[in-house]
Amino acid sequence: MKKRIFSGIQPSNVIHIGNYIGAVKRWVESQNDAEKENIFCAVDLHALTVPQDPKMLRERTLELMALFLAVGLDPDKSILFVQSHVTVHAEGAWLLNCITPEGWLKKMTQYKDKSAKQEIVLTGLLDYPVLMAADILFYDTNEVPVGNDQKQHVELARNIAERFNHLFGETFVVPEPLIAEAGARIMALDDPTMKMSKSMAHVKGHSVNLLDDPKDIERAIMRAKTDSGSEIRFSKDAEKAGVNNLLTIYQVLTGKSQEASELDFANARGYGDLKKAVAEVVISATEPIRNRHKEIMTDRAELERIMRVGADKARVISEPRLADVKRKMGLILP
Ligand code: AMP
Ligand code: TRP
């Protein structure tokens, strides 16, 4: 039996190289693994958990679908769709809400961080991980490739699956988070003690975004914060976080080992050489994506067709599980 893979990304803000390295790039690798059946989703309902401009959200969702294609996801090999096009997610989240203790949600670190920054905390923000559990569980997902920050949410989905199975009998597959060894937490260029984050993407120098032009990429990387030393090596020392982050980006994008990456800089004259090399690999990884994206965005009708086909395939998988869950919980099926 093939392993089923499900992952999602929000169409909020632009996609940065942390999203690419921690998640999307790995989806493309997963798609090319014959042992896996892959489903990737633009999670627009999740984006609504913080205020969005409606017009922008629509545009960003289309752009994200185009980005899926531009990075090499193929609608003939993977299921690519928009979350709100398949009503199973919202319905399923409600059903799972009714077996999930609220204490589990209040403990989530992302909720604690995000809610501390909001004046009004929306109920959807608290409930966000239950919607994510529905995304995962109604597809009988085995593995969820995500960055480090989503590990706790996948663990919550596991707890919800186990609780449901305990209450109503064996139903859900208990999913595993799939976290990369390298690059699961890319740090901000301007402050390598915090993670690169979409919500900070508007701050100059914070991140490199997948669709940035080469000049901006070079500028952001050349200005990246490092330490006052000159040693180019991987390190867990807080002081070396900037260099460690640049080396990690270099390592993942070149596909080299840590040793080989360090060796490439054995004769470097300083951090300037490292930054130049990192800028080069980031530009050569992102430039083809940017060009393809531009081209794909010119054919909206085709994008819309791809979204429809993906949603149809997603429904075929998730609707039977939804009916099963409704029946087990005591609802009359129409
Ligand atoms: P989000 O930006 O929250 O929609 O996240 C989309 C995907 O990117 C998730 O799998 C995250 O875990 C991953 N991700 C987000 N930020 C980073 C980061 N700084 N480093 C690595 N992965 C990340
Ligand atoms: N919450 C995830 C994030 O912000 C996105 C997401 C939603 C997701 N549903 C998912 C990831 C299901 C994996 C599986 O990064």
Image (spheres, rainbow, N blue to C red):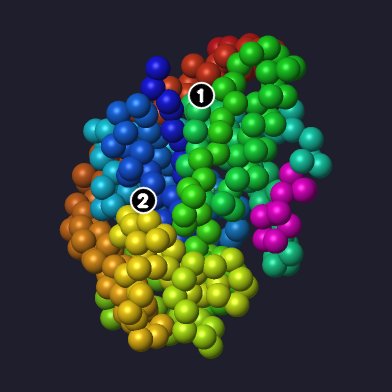
Which numbered marker is on residue 140?
1
Identify the residue at horizontal 30%, vertical 60% (top origin): 254
Q: Residue furthest right?
A: 103
Magenta-drawn stretch, dominant element (helix, strand or loop): helix
Which numbered marker is on residue 72?
none
Residue 204 location, x and y as percent? 46, 81
Viewer-proximal residue among 200 and 285: 285
Residue 334 location, x and y as percent? 56, 12
Under mark 1, the amino acid is: Asp
- Which residue is label 2 attached to? 25
Q: Does residue 284 appear left or right of residue 94 in this picture?
A: left
Under mark 2, the amino acid is: Lys
Identify the residue at horizontal 43%, vertical 27% (top origin): 4
Identify the residue at horizontal 62%, vertical 73% (top origin): 238
Identify the residue at horizontal 35%, vertical 68% (top origin): 263
Q: Earlier in the sequence, mark 2 or mark 1?
A: 2
Query: What are the residue bounds of the magenta stretch?
Result: 105-114
Residue 134 location, x and y as percent? 58, 33
